[in-house]
Image: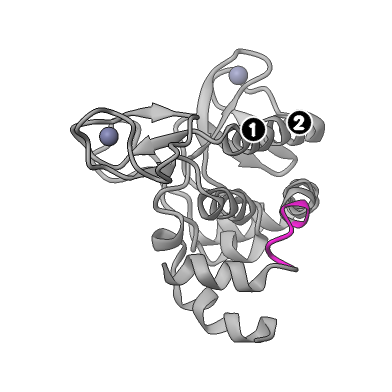
């Protein structure tokens, strides 16, 4: 099957569903060290997108493009090394055995008496989705349509005090287009290295139906 056969599957899944297990993009301000979750052009108590970039609300420092893309790249590398570390975890909740050792009995848990099955803690599906999630944060069209996975929910202690109007989202996204494209290119580099998107279509199809 060609790449087009995937289109309906890819597009019928909302970002909310597809990225439900993906980790947030946690950044820190290079000036005051405040840590915060970056969720795209959204309202946040910790940062704002201004006309010339990403601004820390605590100290008003504006990230240089390189400060943002370097943090993004080191976070991507951390996720990739976690994946390559190959940790296995027992799927029996009462056991929770974590190891890098693969049993001679295949996927069986090595803890005595446990009937659990060892699974990769960080699967290729998760890594792929994680990269796609990061990419979505810098996707201008998705930002404008406000289709990104929510990072704050009503009732959270960090739920933003102020809202961001639809027109502000449109304008700020457009003003930061170049910055967002730089970061997308960083992610694209790893996505295409990962290869799955372009060559292993069969593999993608498999994990989506499993
Ligand atoms: Zn700061
Ligand atoms: Zn076990």
Identify the residue under disc 1.
Answer: 81
- Quick check: 193 above or below 104? below
Near mark 1 (Cα within 10 A), the count class, few <14, some 14-19 or many ≥20, is few
Sequence-first disc among 1 and 2: 2
- Give the x, y percent position of residue 110: 33, 31
State the image quarter where residue 140 is shown: bottom right
Q: Quadrant of the C terminus?
A: bottom left
Q: Which residues are magenta?
A: 192-198
| Farthest top residue in view | 32
Helix, strand or loop at label 2? It is: helix
Residue at coordinates 69% horizontally, 34% vertically from top-left?
77
Measure the alpha-carbon separation of dots 1 and 2.
17 Å
Q: Quadrant of the N terminus?
A: bottom right
The answer to whether marks 1 and 2 mark residues whose Cβ atoms lie closer than 8 Å is no
Residue at coordinates 64% horizontally, 53% vertically from top-left?
135
Per the rendering, the mark at residue 168 is: none
Nearest the eye: 23 or 2: 2
Residue at coordinates 47% horizontally, 50% vertically from top-left?
164
Identify the residue under disc 2.
Answer: 70
State the image quarter where residue 6 is shown: bottom right
């Amino acid at each position: 099957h060609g790449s087009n056969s995937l289109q309906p599957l890819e597009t019928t899944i909302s970002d909310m569903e597809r990225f439900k297990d993906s980790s947030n993009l946690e950044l820190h301000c290079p000036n005051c060290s405040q840590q915060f979750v970056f969720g795209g052009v959204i309202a946040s108590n910790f940062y704002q997108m201004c006309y010339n970039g990403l601004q820390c609300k605590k100290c008003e420092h504006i990230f240089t493009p390189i400060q943002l893309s370097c943090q993004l790249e080191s976070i991507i590398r951390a996720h990739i090394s976690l994946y390559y570390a190959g940790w296995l975890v027992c799927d029996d909740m009462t056991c929770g055995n974590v190891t890098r050792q693969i049993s001679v009995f295949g996927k069986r848990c090595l803890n005595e008496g446990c009937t659990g099955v060892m699974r990769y803690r960080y699967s290729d599906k998760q890594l792929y989705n994680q990269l796609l999630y990061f990419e979505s944060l810098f996707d201008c069209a998705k930002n404008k349509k406000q289709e990104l996975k929510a990072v704050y929910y009503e009732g959270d202690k960090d739920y933003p005090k102020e809202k961001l109007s639809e027109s502000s989202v449109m304008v700020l996204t457009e003003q930061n287009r170049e910055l967002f494209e730089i970061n997308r290119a960083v992610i694209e580099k790893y996505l295409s290295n990962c290869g799955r998107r372009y060559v292993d279509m069969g593999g993608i199809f498999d994990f989506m139906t499993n």
